[in-house]
Image: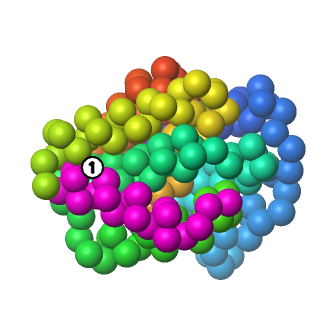
């Protein structure tokens, strides 16, 4: 739980340092019914809030995130997160696919391109995890040239990883490895 608070603070500082506009505005407090005020559910709330912060940071950069490098790296990132524990159930694959094609920023790209790249990486990871991971990290590393894109790739991974309400150690590890490939300190994302 403390980890999410740490990330939340970092997201806040990150936001201030980026001067991100509109992140605290629309759509932020409206996630889920008003049940978030119950005692004991604050960590869930902060998690949803954090995902909201990443989503709005991504949305504010939407117009800059149109390159093939960002598209390919974020699909490799989503596949790494989905397969982080070494397996991907068909339902999970479908859920991540839906998250991808409904993601506001990723709508810059045709849905079938995204699905194809995501599934290609998942298939490789399932066939040979180490080799698939090495290939995915190579693709991710190509986004390192542009720091804004590199961060967006990690944010996309965080949004997908946190979408089910839990952030598994294996998913955190996958995100750390992606940060390393992108020359971003993982601490920036609290992982």
Res 177 quadrant in image: top left
Q: Main secondary structure of the magenta part?
A: helix
Residue placed most toward the observer, 144 or 90:
144
Q: Is residue 39 visible?
A: no
Q: Is residue 124 magenta?
A: yes
**Taking the image as drawn, is residue 129 in sight?**
yes
- Write the residue at 59% across / 54% down: 51
> Which residue has dot 1 on it?
84
**Residue at 50% across / 64% down in the picture?**
113
Q: Position of residue 68 (x, y in %)?
A: 57, 46
Classify residue 79 by image quadrant: bottom left
Relative to 177, 148 lies left or right: right
Q: How many numbered discs, if any?
A: 1
Residues 1 and 118: in front is: 118
Residue found at the very far left of the displayed protein = 128
Residue 15 in the figure: left or right of residue 144: right
- How far across and how far down the image is residue 72, in percent? 48, 48
**In this rendering, position of residue 114 left or right of residue 55:** left
Q: Is residue 82 above or below residue 95?
A: above
Quarter that holds the C terminus: top left
Crowding near pointer 1: few (<14 within 10 Å), some, many (20+)? many
Q: Which residues are magenta?
A: 108-126
Asked which secondary structure carries label 1, the reply is loop
Task: Tell me the residue at 63%/44% (across/down).
Answer: 67
Chosen colour scheme: rainbow
Q: Relative to 38, is 72 on the left or the right?
A: left
In the displayed structure, 98 sits above or below 130; it is: below
Instruction: Give percent across and percent down for residue 149.
Output: 62, 37
Q: Quadrant of residue 178?
A: top left
Q: Indicate the position of residue 82 as horizontal and vertical percent values.
A: 33, 57
Residue beneath the point at 39% across and 59% down = 118
């Amino acid at each position: 739980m403390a980890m999410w608070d740490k990330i939340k603070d970092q997201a806040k500082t990150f936001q201030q340092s980026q001067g991100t506009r509109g992140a605290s505005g629309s759509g932020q407090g409206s996630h889920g019914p008003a049940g978030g005020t119950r005692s004991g559910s604050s960590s869930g709330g902060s998690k949803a809030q954090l995902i909201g912060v990443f989503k709005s940071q991504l949305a504010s950069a939407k117009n800059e995130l149109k390159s093939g490098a960002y598209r390919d790296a974020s699909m490799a990132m989503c596949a790494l997160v989905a397969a982080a524990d070494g397996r991907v159930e068909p339902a999970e694959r479908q859920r991540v696919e839906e998250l991808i094609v409904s993601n506001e920023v990723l709508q810059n790209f045709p849905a079938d391109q995204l699905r194809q790249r995501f599934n290609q990486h998942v298939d490789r990871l399932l066939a040979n995890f180490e080799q698939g991971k090495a290939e995915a990290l190579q693709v991710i590393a190509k986004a390192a040239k542009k720091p804004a894109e590199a961060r967006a790739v990690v944010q996309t991974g965080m949004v997908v990883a946190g979408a089910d309400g839990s952030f598994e150690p294996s998913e955190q590890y996958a995100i750390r490895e992606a940060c390393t490939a992108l020359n971003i300190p993982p601490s920036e994302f609290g992982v």
